[in-house]
């Protein structure tokens, strides 16, 4: 890009260069034409000029010759003794006219229109066109005669004559005058006293024609001076006001006429040809230019896109692959090398399914199906491969067909490494089903196991459920510490597992409570023997740091054959039986019997109380703040319901929420909580969010969207300050319906928070599909932070995943400074827990807000 940008100012595009060249040639051509024309005109002009000069010379000479002839002729009459004798004194007309000595032949033969003999006073003799006249000469000659006479006399001695142009009868003529004298050698008379003979030669057209013909000039004639065309040549005829004019040949004009038209024609043709050629050249140059330009810009675009592609390919965490039509790898991006540790050459040319494999469908078939992809189907496939170190890795593969000329030329796509995600998913999955300490199944897995086993009801094989509680565990924990307690729990887990068979389940419910679900053990006898063995087994000392620890166990027994096929009911019954066993002195076991069913009575009572409590408004909300971890400022508050029981005092939600959920009471209770929370929080600072827990039962048994909408409208609480906390169980029952409800809730403007994240099933999938804004990592994982390194990895993975999905991540149940620190290191967004603040009632919370704010403003 830079290179071309640098080039362009120094060399203009070719069409501009061509234009310059063309302009140069055109100027040269025009110049050449001008010079040629100039030279031509110059030649013509000089031809014309020299011709004109020549003709003037000839005209002049011809006239001169005529005058000379006239002079000679006159001289032969004037210098003549006889003429002197007969005309100098009184004129002798007989001699002159009748004897034709100076007679009419002067006109008829010699062409003189006038012949006069004059002296100072009068005209002695006058002939006009050969006829004798008595009028004086001045009648005809419009010129004073005296000067002519004087002039003629003055040159008489030298036998000379005088000549002058005059108007004769109004027409130009030449007067030749000479004094009449005897033809002596030595002039004996005084020429000033003699008469003067004058011949008038009128320049008639016929004479001029002859004169012109003699000089080789045509069109000779006389014109009045002034009205002369400039291309005419002329000679002035004395003072007469007339001039002699003749046609001047103009060879230059002829030359021009002959040469100019073909020359101009040739120039025109040449000019047109040049214009045509120039336009063609210019167009071609422009075309070259524009194609060069488009080539350059497409080159640039190509370069840029290649750079972009390379940058993306190298910066992305994904690697990019391409195959030919036989699905052999033909390209692997640089990232492939980084991610897998292989060299590209190791795999180029190899079939792609040798590198990647998929558990659910052959990769080759899947790729073939991508040749005509189904837009409904997600074009991603989870594949596994072994990296260079032999480590099993996972990636998400996307693919697209490469079409060339309508034919399949191969495939290309990306592979995103999801090894960590898969591992985290697996770990979360495992954790959600297992107890972190002992690795036994947890309550979740137990429920699922029972659900599965009891599915067939009466037709299912009989099951026995044993609820086991350790005796004297708490003292060990209290006196020797958690580590000793954990060691005991681990050992108990081993012994329990060892004493059960493959199809059985051993679960830890928390604390020192375990459940065993036994298959195909139905007779009391059998159960008795097993229980006795278990108690004996657990009674054996447990070695911990060179100490022998002694514990015992109590067991409660429930059987499907007797207590039915409801999992919760079975556990409840076993729990009652266990309680009985403990009450009966520990280290023993009891079978459930209906007589033990005071619990059931209690529950009924509770249910009634709950109904009344709703009526009597016995519920209160406590509030637990949530903090931004970085600054430890309060950003949100969770509303947690309590029951101010008239007899039993303040009860936590765990004692009545499950019951409310089993009956429909959860719906009015949920509405109350939501309304109370909104009304209370309306008076709190605007930035403070309020979280309200929603029970899954509210989703299935009421129109949550409408409830939330109504309460928001009625309380005037802004939706964006309300956050609803939902557990994954909501989605378990009705996946489609839950998605619809959540989308509708989001459309109201509220935030959605996934509560107890990590305890449910397939959490990641839900996160991707549902419109959550935030997640809350379950407190179980946070509790494990300080002790269990395993939990730490899970928390880390959850935080990273949450962030990758753009969610706000909260950790709940933060009880210690170490936990807070650990979360800070993992860059968790928000925290909540006893360490920062327990849930407190409204007044206490408002006080806490005040203190918090004043300490903050004090600090800042
Ligand atoms: P939850 O939504 O997970 O709420 C957090 C529970 O953990 C609260 O118990 C809280 O007091 C407790 N807790 C907070 N910090 C710590 C800590 O640092 N360590 C420990 N160990 N616990 C901590 P609580 O108030 O007893 O509520 C229990 C559960 O009852 C709640 O769990 C929630 O699922 C349910 N619940 C509470 N209020 C409501 C309600 O208004 N509606 C519904 N549907 N359920 C509610
Ligand atoms: Ca909650
Ligand atoms: Ca929770």
Image (tube, grey):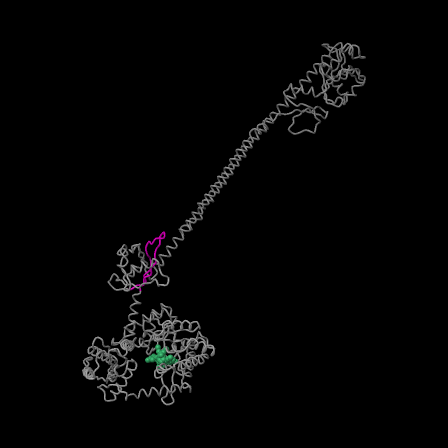
Relative vertical location of residue 283 with respect to residue 262 in this rendering, above or below: below
Residue 244 at x, y percent in the picture: 68, 24
Q: Is 747 or 839 nearer to us in this picture?
A: 747
- Left or right, 461 with reference to 758: left
Q: Which residues are magenta?
A: 394-417
Q: Is 625 or 509 nearer to us in this picture?
A: 509
Any part of residue 60 in sight: yes
Name the outermost residue toward the bottom: 647
- Left or right, 269 with reference to 293: right
* Quadrant assignment for ligand 1: bottom left
Q: Quadrant of the C terminus?
A: bottom left
Residue 644 at x, y percent in the picture: 39, 86
Any part of residue 837 in sight: no
Q: Is 466 or 204 nearer to us in this picture?
A: 466
Q: Quadrant of residue 61?
A: top right
Name the outermost residue toward the front: 459
Asked whether 402 falls inside the magenta stretch, the response is yes
Residue 661 at x, y percent in the picture: 36, 81
The number of discs equals 0
Asked whether 130 falls inside the magenta stretch, the response is no
Q: Main secondary structure of the magenta part?
A: strand
Q: Quadrant of residue 556?
A: bottom left
Relative vertical location of residue 515 with respect to residue 290 in this rendering, above or below: below
Residue 512 at x, y percent in the picture: 26, 81
Relative vertical location of residue 656 with respect to residue 228 in this rendering, above or below: below
């Amino acid at each position: 890009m830079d290179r071309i940008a640098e080039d362009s100012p120094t060399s203009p595009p070719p069409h501009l260069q061509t234009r310059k060249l063309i302009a140069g040639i055109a100027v040269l051509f025009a110049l050449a034409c001008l010079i040629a024309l100039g030279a031509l005109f110059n030649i013509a002009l000089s031809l014309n000029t020299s011709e004109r000069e020549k003709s003037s010379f000839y005209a002049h000479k011809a006239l001169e010759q005529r005058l000379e002839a006239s002079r000679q002729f006159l001289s032969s009459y004037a210098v003549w003794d006889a003429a002197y004798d007969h005309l100098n004194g009184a004129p002798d007309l007989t001699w002159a006219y009748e004897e034709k000595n100076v007679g009419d032949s002067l006109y008829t033969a010699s062409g003189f229109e006038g012949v006069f003999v004059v002296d100072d006073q009068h005209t002695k003799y006058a002939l006009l066109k050969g006829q004798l006249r008595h009028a004086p000469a001045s009648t005809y000659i419009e010129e004073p005669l005296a000067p002519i006479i004087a002039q003629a006399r003055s040159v008489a001695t030298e036998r000379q004559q005088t000549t002058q142009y005059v108007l004769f009868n109004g027409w130009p003529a030449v007067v030749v005058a000479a004094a009449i004298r005897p033809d002596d050698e030595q002039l004996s008379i005084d020429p000033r006293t003699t008469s003067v003979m004058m011949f008038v030669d009128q320049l008639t057209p016929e004479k001029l024609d002859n004169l012109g013909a003699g000089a080789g000039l045509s069109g000779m004639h006389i014109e009045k001076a002034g009205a002369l065309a400039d291309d005419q040549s002329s000679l002035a005829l004395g003072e007469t006001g007339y001039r002699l004019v003749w046609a001047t040949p103009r060879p230059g004009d002829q030359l021009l006429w002959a040469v100019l038209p073909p020359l101009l024609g040739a120039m025109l043709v040449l000019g047109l040809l040049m214009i045509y050629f120039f336009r063609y050249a210019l167009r071609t140059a422009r075309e070259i230019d524009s194609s060069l330009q488009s080539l350059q810009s497409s080159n640039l675009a190509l370069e840029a896109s290649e750079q972009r592609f390379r940058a993306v390919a190298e910066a992305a965490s994904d690697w990019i692959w391409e195959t030919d039509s036989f699905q052999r790898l033909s390209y692997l991006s640089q990232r492939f090398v980084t991610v897998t540790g292989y060299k590209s050459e190791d795999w180029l040319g190899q079939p792609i399914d040798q590198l990647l494999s998929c558990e659910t469908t052959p990769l080759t078939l899947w790729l073939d199906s991508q040749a005509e992809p189904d837009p409904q189907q997600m074009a991603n496939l989870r594949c596994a491969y072994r990296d260079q170190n032999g480590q099993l890795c996972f990636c998400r593969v996307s693919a697209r067909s490469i079409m060339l000329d309508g034919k399949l030329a191969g495939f290309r796509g990306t592979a995103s490494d999801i090894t960590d995600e898969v591992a985290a998913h697996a770990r979360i999955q495992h954790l959600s089903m297992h107890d972190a300490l002992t690795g036994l199944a947890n309550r979740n897995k137990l429920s699922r196991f029972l659900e599965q086993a009891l599915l067939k009801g009466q037709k299912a094989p009989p099951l026995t459920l044993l609820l086991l509680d350790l005796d004297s565990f708490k003292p060990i924990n209290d006196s020797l510490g958690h580590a000793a307690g954990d060691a005991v729990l681990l050992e108990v887990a081993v012994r329990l597992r060892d004493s059960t068979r493959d199809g059985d389940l051993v679960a830890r419910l928390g604390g020192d409570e375990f459940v065993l679900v036994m298959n195909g053990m139905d007779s009391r006898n059998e159960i008795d023997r097993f229980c006795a063995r278990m108690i004996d087994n657990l009674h054996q000392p447990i070695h911990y740091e060179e100490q022998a620890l002694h514990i015992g166990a109590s067991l409660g027994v429930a059987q499907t054959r007797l207590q039915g096929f409801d999992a919760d009911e079975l556990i409840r019954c076993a729990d009652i039986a266990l309680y009985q066993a403990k009450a009966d002195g520990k280290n023993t076991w009891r079978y459930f019997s209906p007589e033990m069913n005071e619990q059931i009575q209690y529950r009924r009572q509770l249910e009634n109380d709950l109904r009344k409590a709703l009526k009597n408004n016995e519920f209160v909300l406590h509030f637990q703040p949530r903090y931004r971890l970085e600054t430890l400022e309060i950003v949100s508050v969770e509303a947690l319901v309590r029951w101010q029981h008239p007899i039993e005092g303040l009860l936590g939600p765990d004692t009545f929420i499950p019951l409310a959920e089993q009956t429909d009471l959860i719906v009015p209770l949920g509405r109350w909580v939501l309304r109370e929370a909104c009304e209370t929080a309306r008076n709190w600072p605007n930035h403070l969010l309020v979280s309200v827990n929603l029970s899954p039962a509210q989703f299935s048994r009421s129109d949550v969207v409408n409830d939330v909408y109504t309460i928001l409208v009625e309380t005037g609480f802004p939706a964006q300050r309300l956050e609803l906390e939902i557990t994954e169980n909501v989605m378990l029952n009705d996946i489609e319906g839950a998605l619809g409800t959540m989308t509708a809730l989001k459309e109201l403007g509220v935030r959605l928070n996934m509560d107890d994240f990590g305890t449910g099933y397939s959490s990641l999938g839900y996160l991707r599909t549902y419109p959550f804004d935030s997640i809350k990592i379950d407190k179980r994982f946070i509790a494990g932070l300080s002790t269990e390194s395993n939990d730490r990895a899970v928390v880390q993975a959850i935080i990273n995943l949450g962030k990758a999905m753009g969610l706000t991540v909260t950790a709940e149940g933060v009880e210690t400074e170490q936990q807070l620190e650990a979360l800070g290191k993992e860059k968790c967004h928000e925290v909540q827990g006893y360490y920062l603040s327990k849930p407190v009632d409204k007044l206490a919370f408002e006080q806490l807000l005040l203190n918090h704010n004043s300490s903050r403003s004090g600090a800042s």
